[in-house]
Image: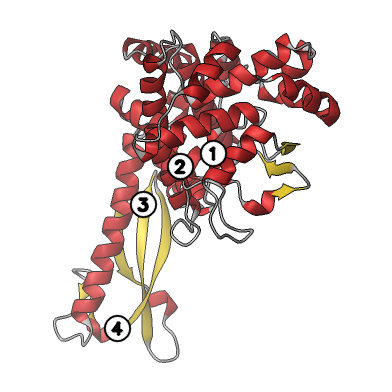
Amino acid sequence: MTINVVCRRDAINRNRLAPLALVFTHDRRRKFVGLGMSVLLEHWDFEKQQPTTDCPDRAEIQFQITSKIREYEKKIKKLEVLEIPVTFDNLFEQNGKRINCTVGDYFKQIIDRLEKVEKYGSASKHKVTLALMQHFKSTNMRFDELDLTYLREFEIFLRQRGNVNNSLATKFSVLKAVYNKAVSEGVFVPKSNPFQQFKVGSLWTNTRKRAITKEDIHKLIELDLSDRDFYTQLAKDIFLFSYFMAGINFKDIALLTYGDIENGRIYYARRKTGKMMNCCLTEQAQEIIDKYHTDQVEEDYLFPILNRQIHTTEKQILERVKKTLKHVNKRLHELSEEIGLHTPLTTYVARHTFATVLKRSGVDIGIISESLGHSDLKTTQIYLDSFENTQIDAAMQNLL
């Protein structure tokens, strides 16, 4: 394909101005694309196809011509790199999807969209997956190159880096979602979908649920940390609060406010699923809240993790929660060694322990779904939907 500039003498207007255009020639066909500029015929050198030396706007016209030609040359080069046929249809496609959307480009578009709607957690997962793909091979590739062979080789690459099944499943779930999104948005039309053969769901495995005993809970309660640093004390309190409050996870704890407490119960929406939850505020949990109690309004957080005057955006909240969780889990590991536990403590161990205690208290295993921590949280939530609060409340009296 060749690109040249022409002055259209066949389209002179009443002011004797002739429009300038780029003419593209390919397979004996020509296509004209206007440049949005016109010149007097006497100011155009038809032999050299450029403005004359005495053209008043010569420098500006020449700059615009050169810039536009370079723009199209880059598009042609990109089509060639992607091995997409250089045709008028592909070069001038209105939305430019096929030209501008390599796998890497499209990933970045999705990440940008997620961040614009403040879904920073999901955006972070996409960033991690993209970074690993870039380490594996160049993402300057077409979507139809993302075939079954690529997926299998990428899996081997990730396993060699120490990724286990559930970690692999998370990354391939992100990749599959981006692939399907690209198809649904018409970025490309697949001849076949490699994910029909590469089963992401088969990568998920049931991990061993880590829970401690009631006796271990008592050891932690009795541990005197009055002379220890802030994060060590907070770690113990958060773990016990989660245990006494139906295994509520760390991010949901961080976001609890005084306004969420009503008539001896705590009401909140799980950030992970959006599901509305509520549970009775146990005496032990109330004591932990009271420890951090200050003069407050309903909008204030229960725990000194977030500050509503400082952490005002979703991104700031996410970053603060992640940073604090890292500190808390580090201190919990130290505490588990201190009281002689074989199971390293994390905030999620509190969730698993709560579920295990409920199970041993006679609560139906189908309802608790083996510690609320299996890979299919939707199934767990379906069971919880039909479970009476009174049954859970009664079972929670057996936590100690």
If the image is split into quadrants, where does the C terminus sit? top right
Label disc, if present, on residue 41 of the rendered structure: 4
- For the residue pair 387 and 2, the one nearer the viewer reads as 387
Secondary structure beneath label 4: helix
Determine whether 127 is above or below 290 in the image: above
The residue at which mark 3 appears reads as 25
The residue at which mark 1 appears reads as 251
What's the residue type where badge 2 is placed?
Answer: Val
Tell me the quarter of the picture where residue 146 sits: top left
Q: Earlier in the sequence, mark 3 or mark 2?
A: 3
Marks 1/4: CA–CA distance? 70 Å
Q: Earlier in the sequence, mark 1 or mark 4?
A: 4
Q: Earlier in the sequence, mark 4 or mark 2?
A: 4
What's the residue type where badge 1 is placed?
Answer: Lys
Closer to the eye: label 3 or 1: 1
Tell me the quarter of the picture where residue 367 sits: top right
